[in-house]
Amino acid sequence: MMNLQTKLPKVGTTIFSVMSQLAAEHGAINLGQGFPDFEGPQALKDALTRAMNAGCNQYAPAPGIPQLREQIALKTERLYGCSVNPDTEVTVTAGATEALFAAIAATVRPGDEVIVFDPSYDSYEPAIDLQGGRAVHLALVAPNFGLPFAELEAAINDRTRMIIINSPQNPTGGALLREDLDMLAALIGERDIYVLSDEVYEHIIFDGLEHATVLSHPQLAPRSFAISSFGKTYHITGWKVGYCIAPAALTAEFRKVHQYLTFCCFHPAQVALAEFMASDQQHYLDLPAFYQAKRDLFANALQGSRFKIMPVRGSYFQVVDYSAISDQDDMSFCRWLTTEHQIAAIPLSPFCETPPAGRYARLCFAKQDETLLEAAGRLCRV
Ligand code: PMP
Ligand code: GLN
């Protein structure tokens, strides 16, 4: 018999798969796993079909096709006023998930510490563990889920190799401000610490707030990997296309991992995205209003419920406090909500080293208005 010793003892099936499966079994409205129940732009889908019929069906260049990297660079310049070199600083990846993994694999060595802020996205820690690194968990501060700067200052030491930030934040709906990045930069100082900035919800930010990107931050940009995902921006989570922007020296290391992880990603999707982005610079500018309307519709419809609505600055997630309804832990509560009330939600504890203080569940509002109203009606009866 093989003596199988798992390299990931803490990992089971992700909470997203578990809750989607439970939702399907119980005919629940799935506000759990984060994905839209509506379609992306028709012109983008048409461009994908055209790309396949035009024969773009063999390997793409490993860093991504030049036209798409060019469009990413143009968008970054237009939106954030910073110039990135598409040849040496932009890499197209198989979703943000691959980019996060490749950035961690390229930089974290055995014994290194990586600071993550809980609740933190579930793919960070397994990637750190596989490199022999250690995730150091610091809790975000409710109700706005801001960075805990005093704890961060105390946690940084000679073993700290990377700090992972995520703004707008999944699952809390928090968002960092420019002054948060200034504080982060001041705490890092001149140390050899990379910043991995998960910016997949960069275009989903509300109430007139501007997305604070590391790309335009003079102290952070030279040490940062900025990650984004077309899945969020164009409502195409199943296409799994994302990208990483990092200075040339970091990108060179990133690409060493990327070329053996996937080599390249789905060629027709890259052609379609490049074509669409060249012809449409409006879609992502409309996203804040589009999703803010959904956030507000859903929150208003929940006013008559016993859930307490937490503030949402960005992302497409609404955290609710269910302490007026139940004493159950969040895993049990979300299962119960799915099986008894046919609404699937995501507990926050799988995103945390120590369970969060408070009774919270995450609801995804990237849904058609009718879905949100039907779901809110059910939640008001809980
Ligand atoms: N980071 C965060 C914060 C996410 O929410 C997600 C997906 N929901 C990802 C990364 C992964 O993105 P992708 O689907 O493009 O791999
Ligand atoms: N990122 C999505 C979420 O937070 C899920 C992605 C996945 O299922 N891996 O819900």
Image: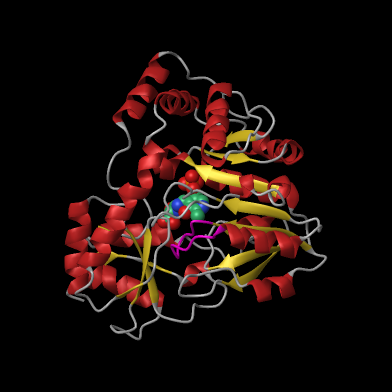
* Point 21% across, 62% down: residue: 375
Residue 53 drawn at (x, y percent): 38, 15
Residue 79 drawn at (x, y percent): 51, 39
Q: What is the magenta segment's predominant secondary structure?
A: loop
* Point 31% across, 47% down: residue: 290
Range of the magenta residues?
167-177
* Point 53% across, 44% down: residue: 228
Query: Is 332 located above or below residue 202 in the figure?
Result: below
Residue 265 vs residue 151: left or right? left
Task: Please check the rendered image and state whether residue 175 is part of the magenta-colored stretch, yes or no.
Answer: yes
Query: Is 211 located above or below residue 23 in the figure?
Result: above
Quadrant (top left, top right, bottom left, bottom right) of the C terminus: bottom left
Residue 354 drawn at (x, y percent): 55, 77
Residue 125 vs residue 208: left or right? right
Foreground pick, 370 / 303: 303
Residue 21 drawn at (x, y percent): 33, 58
